Amino acid sequence: MGVASSRAVPILTPQLKDEEVKLIVPWSLEEIGDTSAISALIEALGNNNVEMRAAGSRGIPKRSWTQACLSLVHSVKKAKTTTTSRRRYW
């Protein structure tokens, strides 16, 4: 897409947290194809919503999968630690 589309990235990335539109935003960012959206899409992999994680993963270009996988592993480890910590107190 063109320069005008790239200007939409800073407007769209905060919308990844908006419950009403968050599932269409990763698709939009994928279509734009601007590399500045990659970090926001990788952050979406840590979302509690499975659909959101899937949508975010589809928007990440193949050349960034290594970074995305490392981020996802970190999110999973963090979630396990949080869950384990909570169990100790119950």
Image (cartoon, rainbow, N blue to C red):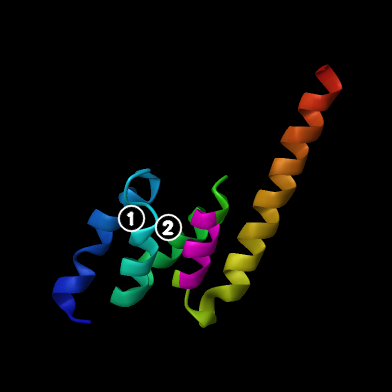
Residue at (70, 43) in percent of width and height: 78
Residue 88, located in which quarter of the rendered image?
Answer: top right
Left or right placement of residue 69 versus residue 15 in this view: right
Q: Quadrant of the N terminus?
A: bottom left
Q: Residue furthest right?
A: 88
Q: Is residue 74 above or below residue 38?
A: above
CA gap between label 2 and label 1 equals: 6 Å
Question: Which numbered circle lies on residue 65?
Answer: none
Secondary structure of the magenta portion, mostly?
Answer: helix
| Residue situated furthest top in the rendering | 90
Residue 71, compared with residue 28, is above or below; it is above
Question: Which quadrant is the C terminus positioned in?
Answer: top right
Q: Position of residue 21 (x, y in %)?
A: 32, 51
Range of the magenta residues?
Answer: 51-58
Q: Is residue 2 above or below residue 81?
A: below
- Name the mark on residue 13: 1
Of mark 2 and mark 1, the one earlier in the sequence is 1
Q: Position of residue 45 (x, y in %)?
A: 55, 57
Q: Which amino acid type is shown beneath numbered disc 1?
A: Thr
Which residue is at 76% across, 42% downward? 80
Q: Do the CB atoms of the residues marked 2 and 1 lie less than 8 Å apart? A: yes
Which element type, helix, strand or loop, lies under badge 1? helix
In the rendered image, the vertical position of residue 80 relative to residue 43, given as above or below: above
Disc number for residue 40: 2
Where does the image place residue 79, in percent across and percent down from the top left? 70, 42
> Which type of secondary structure does the marked residue at label 2 adopt?
helix
**Label 2 crowd bin: few (<14), some (14–19), many (20+), radius 10 Å:** some
